[in-house]
């Protein structure tokens, strides 16, 4: 089922997604890869999303952004008293991912990797 977001929702999603990626200290080139924008946009163009531009109305991009936002929310739930742990968790090898970091899993496996990381944090994702 396709996700439908209006312009204002896509503006909010852009800000929340960029906030999460920045909080996790993900490099700009990797941010493009996580969003599925490698080769379509220069890393410096990501600043537009931070300044109020809406994410493009593209299903793959919006699906990725939605999962990344929910990963951020799940990390906040997991570490409510230590926001820095979210970035640490994303970049620390994890036995659930064969000792790869969650970031590596997402970068190496694209949308499937993003879903895998989201599912590891939010068990309700596996009910679907």
Image (spheres, grey):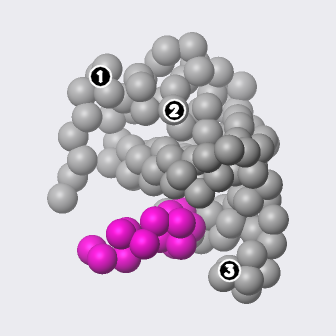
Residue 81 part of the magenta segment: no
What is the number of the mark on residue 47? none
Quadrant in the picture for the C terminus: bottom left
Disc 3 on helix, strand or loop? helix
Say which residue label 1 marks: 7
- What residue is drawn where x is 54% and y is 37%? 17
Q: Are marks 2 and 1 in contact (CB under 8 Å)?
A: no
Q: Where is residue 71? Give x, y as percent.
A: 53, 54
Q: Mark 2 or 1 closer to N-term?
A: 1
Say which residue label 2 marks: 16
In the image, residue 50 sits, relative to residue 104, either above or below, namely above
Main SS, magenta residues: helix
- Residue 100 in view (yes/no): no
Q: CA distance from mark 2 to mark 1?
A: 14 Å
Q: CA distance from mark 3 to mark 2?
A: 25 Å
- What residue is drawn where x is 79% and y is 54%? 88
Q: Where is residue 14? Give x, y as percent.
A: 48, 30
Q: CA distance from mark 1 to mark 3?
A: 36 Å
Say which residue label 3 marks: 97
In the image, residue 48 sits, relative to residue 102, either above or below, namely above
- What residue is drawn where x is 41% and y is 23%? 11
């Amino acid at each position: 089922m396709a996700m439908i977001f209006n312009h204002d929702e896509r503006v909010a999603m852009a800000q929340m997604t960029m906030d999460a990626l920045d909080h996790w200290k993900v490099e700009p080139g990797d941010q493009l890869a996580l969003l599925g924008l490698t080769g379509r946009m220069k890393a410096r163009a990501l600043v537009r999303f931070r300044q109020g531009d809406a994410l493009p109305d593209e299903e793959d991009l919006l699906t990725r952004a939605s999962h990344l936002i929910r990963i951020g929310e799940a990390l906040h739930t997991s570490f409510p008293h230590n926001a820095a742990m979210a970035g640490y968790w994303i970049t620390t090898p994890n036995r659930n991912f064969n000792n790869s970091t969650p970031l590596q899993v997402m970068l190496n496996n694209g949308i499937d990797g993003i879903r895998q990381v989201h599912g590891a944090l939010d068990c309700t994702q596996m009910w679907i």
